């Protein structure tokens, strides 16, 4: 038997046993007491009826007749005068009978009284009734009943109780056994499931039929198992994608290094290949940097140190930094921001966010188009909205839901021109959400893209 069901079973059993013992002993003593009371009442009634007969005619024949009547019954009668002389008896007097009759006692009440009721220790139970004629006490009628018969009766009751009691205990054990099994079975199943989980087997299925707490627990374990399973799959996929991502630029590096090492190359050619190798190495280091960034986010070692930042000054600096790259590609970069707009952000992280978005707009826009970084503050709900708008290639509707996934790129080929690793937007999203903000993307294929970041409750001061 499993430990928990054994524990539960023993607990149930002890409780039920205690309750049963208490109830049975109440029942037993009540039953025995009422049987004894009945016997005494019967004995007294018998004495009363003799006394009535004797009160009607107190003569020798009647007295003998009364005594004779009792000779064949289980009870005995002794008729005495008021001064203690035995007039008649239904059987030979025994010494316990004599002792009972000689006992000192006050006047016997009219309705008679019990002389002895200790059936367990004495040989007889006994009652006495007075014989009164014209308000004069003539004598007494003593009734006796041997306690042997009573003891036999009580013994039989006890025997019955023993049988019923043992049966009840057997039934209790069986009931408790099954009940504790039924109660603990789902628990044991869940325990086994969690053991398998801890060993790394996430394919467990915990069945749950009830909608009580146990059912909820089973549901939670199932959800946990599913989540872990999903996470494991995701991690494997992620690792596969990373190795794939690294392999492509490394192939370029190897290939171009091979060519660059050949003899008889002109200085100019060699420099061209070295330049490509340099760019690819740069790409790899960017990828590794981003991966490290994401790993930090996942481990929660990533802290946001918010400070009060003047947005107009902050974005001006960034725009200045990226403008040459835009100019080089012939893209006009517009910037607008209200002055004196202060927000609480992590300067370093938020610069990463804006640079990433501007970099995307630059990468995915064609020559002679426009990109705008617009910042607005909504006075009514006190929200600051940052938008990066471009007139680039846009993103197909069906791609948008996946755009924030790690390593996700619309352009699946890892060509050297379309360069990105697909990590930028996932990092941006994590940072924005760590600031309590929201990021949203709308795009139309061939028309352009608009990314908006909404920051909560920042006061304009
Ligand atoms: N402004 C945009 N216009 C068109 N497509 C975009 C834009 N921004 C992102 N995308 C698409 O979304 C994909 C994911 O963007 P993300 O910034 O995460 O990665 P990436 O730019 O490819 O690489 P990196 O890690 O260098 O940023 C991009 O590969 C691109 O296909
Ligand atoms: Mg990017």
Image: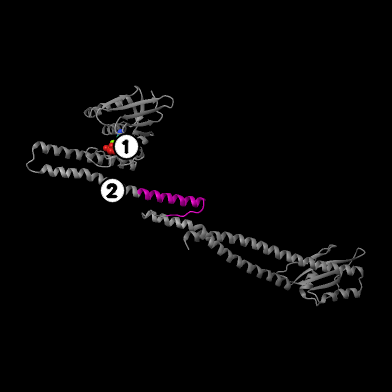
Q: Residue at x 59, y 60 (%)?
A: 18
Answer with the quadrant where ligand 2 appears in the image.
top left
Residue 72 position by quadrant: bottom right
The answer to whether the residue bearing label 1 lies less than 8 angstroms from the nearest atom of ligand 1 is: yes
Q: Nearer the viewer, residue 249 or 339?
A: 249
Q: What secondary structure do most residues of the magenta stretch adopt?
A: helix
Mark linked to residue 240: 2
The answer to whether the residue bearing label 2 lies less than 8 angstroms from the nearest atom of ligand 1 is: no
Q: Residues within 10 Å of mark 2 (few under 14, many from 20)?
A: few
Does residue 247 appear to the left or right of 1 in the view shown? left
Q: Residues within 10 Å of mark 1 (few under 14, many from 20)?
A: many
Q: Which residues are magenta?
A: 205-231
Q: Residue at x 75, y 66 (%)?
A: 117
Please tell me whether residue 85 belongs to the stretch shown in magenta.
no
Q: CA distance from mark 1 to mark 2?
A: 20 Å
Residue 369 percent location from the top left of the image: 27, 28
């Amino acid at each position: 038997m499993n430990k928990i069901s054994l524990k539960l079973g023993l607990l149930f059993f002890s409780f039920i046993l205690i309750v049963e013992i208490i109830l049975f002993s109440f029942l037993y003593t009540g039953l025995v007491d009422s049987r004894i009371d009945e016997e005494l009442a019967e004995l007294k009634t018998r004495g009363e009826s003799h006394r009535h007969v004797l009160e009607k005619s107190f003569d020798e024949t009647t007295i003998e007749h009364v005594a004779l009547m009792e000779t064949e019954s289980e009870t005995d009668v002794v008729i005495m005068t008021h001064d203690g002389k035995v007039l008649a008896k239904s059987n030979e007097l025994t010494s316990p009978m004599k002792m009972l009759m000689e006992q000192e006692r006050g006047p016997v009440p009219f309705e008679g009284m019990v002389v002895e009721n200790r059936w367990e220790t004495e040989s007889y139970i006994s009652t006495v009734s007075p014989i009164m004629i014209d308000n004069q006490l003539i004598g007494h009628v003593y009734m006796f009943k041997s306690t042997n018969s009573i003891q036999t009766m009580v013994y039989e009751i006890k025997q019955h109780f023993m049988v019923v009691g043992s049966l009840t205990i057997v039934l209790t054990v069986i009931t408790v056994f099954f009940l504790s099994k039924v109660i603990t079975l789902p628990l044991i199943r869940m325990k086994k499931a969690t053991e398998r989980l801890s060993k790394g087997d996430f394919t467990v299925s915990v069945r749950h039929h009830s909608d009580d707490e146990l059912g909820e627990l089973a549901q939670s374990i199932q959800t946990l198992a599913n989540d872990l399973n999903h996470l494991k799959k995701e991690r494997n996929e992620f690792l596969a994608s990373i190795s794939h991502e690294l392999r492509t630029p490394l192939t370029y590096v190897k290939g171009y290094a091979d060519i660059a090492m050949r003899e008889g190359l002109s200085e100019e050619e060699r420099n061209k290949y070295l330049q490509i190798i340099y760019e690819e190495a740069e790409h790899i280091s960017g990828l590794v940097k981003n991966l490290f960034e994401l790993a930090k986010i996942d481990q929660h070692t990533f802290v946001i140190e918010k400070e009060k930042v003047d947005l107009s000054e902050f974005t001006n600096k960034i725009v200045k930094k990226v403008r040459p790259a835009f100019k080089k590609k012939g893209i006009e970069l517009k910037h607008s921001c209200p002055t004196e707009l202060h927000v609480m952000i992590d300067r370093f992280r938020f610069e990463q966010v804006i640079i990433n978005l501007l970099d995307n707009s630059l990468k995915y826009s064609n020559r002679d188009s426009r990109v705008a970084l617009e910042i607005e503050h909504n006075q009514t709900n006190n929200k600051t909205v940052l938008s990066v708008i471009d007139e680039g290639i846009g993103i197909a509707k069906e791609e948008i839901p996946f755009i924030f996934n790690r390593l996700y790129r619309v352009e699946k080929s890892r060509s050297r021109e379309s360069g990105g690793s697909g990590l930028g937007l996932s990092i941006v999203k994590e940072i924005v959400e760590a600031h309590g903000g929201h990021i949203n993307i709308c795009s139309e294929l061939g028309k352009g893209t608009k990314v908006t970041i909404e920051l909560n409750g920042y006061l304009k001061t």
